[in-house]
Amino acid sequence: MKLRNLAAALTVAAAALPAAAQPASTEPLRDTVARALQASPEVTARLNAFRAADEALKVGQAGWLPRLDLQADAGQDRDTIDGRLERNQSLNRTGASLTLSQLLWDGLATRNETGRLGHERMARYFELLEATEQTALDAARAHLDVLRFRRLVELAEDNYVQHRYAFLQIQSRVRAGVGRGVDLEQATARLALAESNLATEQANLHDVSARYQRIVGELPARSLAAAGRLSAQAPASAEAAARAAVEQSAAISAAIEGLRAARSAASARQAAFQPRVEARLRAGGGHNYEGILDRSRAATGEVVLAWNLFNGGADQARVRQQAALLAQAMDLRDKACRDTRQTAAIAFNDTGKFGEQIRLLELNTQSIVRARDAYRQQFDIGQRSLLDLLNAENEVYTARRSLANAQVDLDAAFIRTHAAMGQLSAQLGLARRDVGSEIAPWSAADDGPGRCATETAAVVSTPRGDLDARAQRMADTAPQPAAGGAAPTAPR
């Protein structure tokens, strides 16, 4: 599979998989991510880096092959020889030669350098996969953020309308002489706050729309469809999510290949302490060839050994330098593992947390809306103050806003979980990990992460039943109303 096919596989079209392969609800999100992958400079930059690494490997492999050099020259030699009657002699010459060189031994430098370049190429390949997955995640989150803030703008607009309605009612009462001026001041203040909230949400919507344009390459559609929830094939536990993330993370694989490249480079440095042996064949000819009178041709066959015996300590320093770089590569591999496990664990935990929050926030919103409606009716007949009504309106707005945020956060949590496991693009039917048949089956083998804990974080909290029991004990010991409904007297 050639590199241009690799590019086509990564910059996927919408027809990469049959339409039936994905639920219809995820199609809008899939389309957004597909456009982002096609237009992403980050993905194409990583693709070009992979192409460059592929050519660099061919440069290294050329060291195994013979080298043929052509040399041609023309000139004049002038010699001064003491003790002769004719002291100054000149000689016109021309010549051309071919030299064929073949490396016989270089202390395994070429082999180790070729190995390093091969691992660098694999590292660029995994970085390309990581960039593809990260771009897919950024595009999906940008899609969700636009939906989020469009919803929040709608809620802020409704909140403004409700406060404007209350303001107009109070203003009418004050003008009719049946309302208090202080109520109008309160209504004016709350209306200004509602308008400020609307302006803030509109600014936030502008910002996320600009971010969407940066990532996807175009502005979001006016009727951007809901993204759908990628809850299918989600891991069963945090341990499973973290394990899958470590096994499939392109970032960890790239770090492992970086480690292997550093190891090959360290071995290549050892070649400086060994001789270099080449076989050379040279043949040439010309007029007064190589400055020898009447010489017309010459041929040479030789084996040349070159061995540096002292280089000012530079070779030893390079060996120590590469040993430090090898240790650094191990550190970066373990850091990539820790980062990946943390990302996967937090994302999976959020899928459960936001799911529970949505259930409770829905109950909270329903109750607050009913209370607000009751307060409005009581306000109309004078049983509730204006402040009670305005506070209820703010609580409704806050509850609806929290619910809208939690619903989008839950969708984002599933997306982040799939991205942490390196399968978001695959879940959307847009990319596959086996995008190049020239990439051999890969495994970490003995180079897997070392300092990377396998257990997941567990939050120790008091059981809900114990908390309910504490509340019941407080209720049982609270002062009871006196007979006849009078409230107990507060202690002096």
Image (spheres, helix red, strand yellow):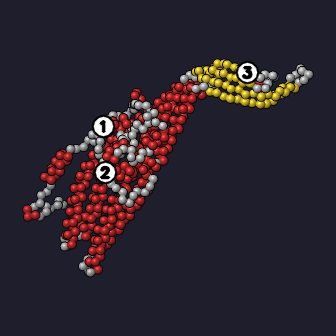
User: Residue 431, position in %: x, y?
Assistant: 39, 42
Residue at mark 1: 240
Q: Earlier in the sequence, mark 3 or mark 2?
A: 2
- Foreground label between 1 and 2: 2
Identify the residue at horizontal 54%, vertical 29% (top origin): 61
| Picture mark count | 3
- Nearer the observer, 187 or 396: 396
Q: On the image, numbered disc 2 is attached to which residue?
A: 25
Q: Residue furthest bottom?
A: 176
Q: Residue 166 at x, y = what percent? A: 28, 71
Q: Quadrant of the C terminus?
A: bottom left
Crowd around label 1: few <14 · some 14–19 · many ≥20 (10 Å): some
Which residue occupies 33% across, 71% down?
188
Mark 3 secondary-structure assignment: strand
Q: Quadrant of residue 244?
A: top left
Residue 82 position (above or below residue 49): above
Outermost residue on the left side: it is: 483
Question: In this figure, which residue is indicated by the disc labeled 3?
Answer: 298
The answer for how far apart the CA atoms under marks 1 and 2 are is 26 Å
- At x 43%, y 47%, the residue is 37
